[in-house]
Amino acid sequence: MASILVVFFSGIFLTVRMSAFDTAWPRVTIGALLLIAPLGAVTGKRMRVIRRNSAEASTMKPDLLRRVQDPFLKISLGTRIAVFFGIVLLMTAKPELWPSIGIVVCSLVLGFLLSLLRWRLAEPFSVRREFEG
């Protein structure tokens, strides 16, 4: 949480120093960061439960295994990474409003779809490992 605040406020400081708030991309970037925040919060809550359960367990219990293999964790991570790269593209290219929104929407959709595809392709292997091991 502290690192997010440092990145957020340093980005605002630099944008003010550059007098770039008159352009569209900084505002869209802030909106994109606000898209990442709820996903990170939900993922963090789930990871705390996993961490607590794994510290208490001496073996991998079925409930813990189910939580670790939760597709939401993988989809959330992939989506947040894609939106982050979209933000980097915004900072680099500095486009106008609609191209900025398009970049964020495309990175959001692309990150979600690629994460979903990766999870779907890996699913049969994880199920097979459960029955073998």
Image: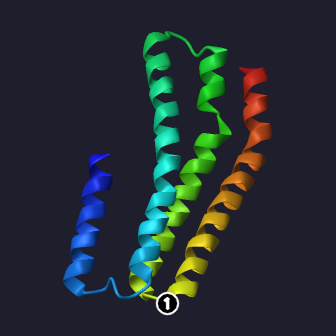
- Here the colouring is rainbow
Q: Is residue 44 left or right of residue 125?
A: left
The quadrant where residue 8 appears = bottom left
Q: Tell me: residue 93, above or below residue 107.
A: below
- Where is mark 1, residue-wise? 96
Is 80 in front, or is 105? 105
Is 22 in front, or is 60? 22
Residue 86, percent from left and from top: 51, 72
Residue 119, percent from left and from top: 71, 47
Q: Is residue 77 left or right of residue 125?
A: left
**Which residue is found at the position 33% from the left and 82% from the top?**
21
Q: Tell me: residue 112, above or below residue 21.
A: above
**Which residue is found at the position 66% from the left and 25% from the top?**
66
Residue found farthest to the front: 22
Is 129 in front, or is 69? 69
Q: Tell me: residue 29, above or below residue 18.
A: above
The quadrant where residue 128 appears = top right
Q: How many marks?
A: 1
**Which residue is found at the position 42% from the left and 87% from the top?**
94
Q: Tell me: residue 67, above or below residue 99.
A: above
- Identify which amino acid the numbered label 1 is placed on: Glu
Residue 38, percent from left and from top: 50, 48
Q: Is residue 78 left or right of residue 56?
A: right
Location of the C terminus (image quadrant)? top right
**Which residue is found at the position 43% from the left and 81% from the top?**
25
Residue 40, percent from left and from top: 47, 46
Is 73 in front, or is 65? 73
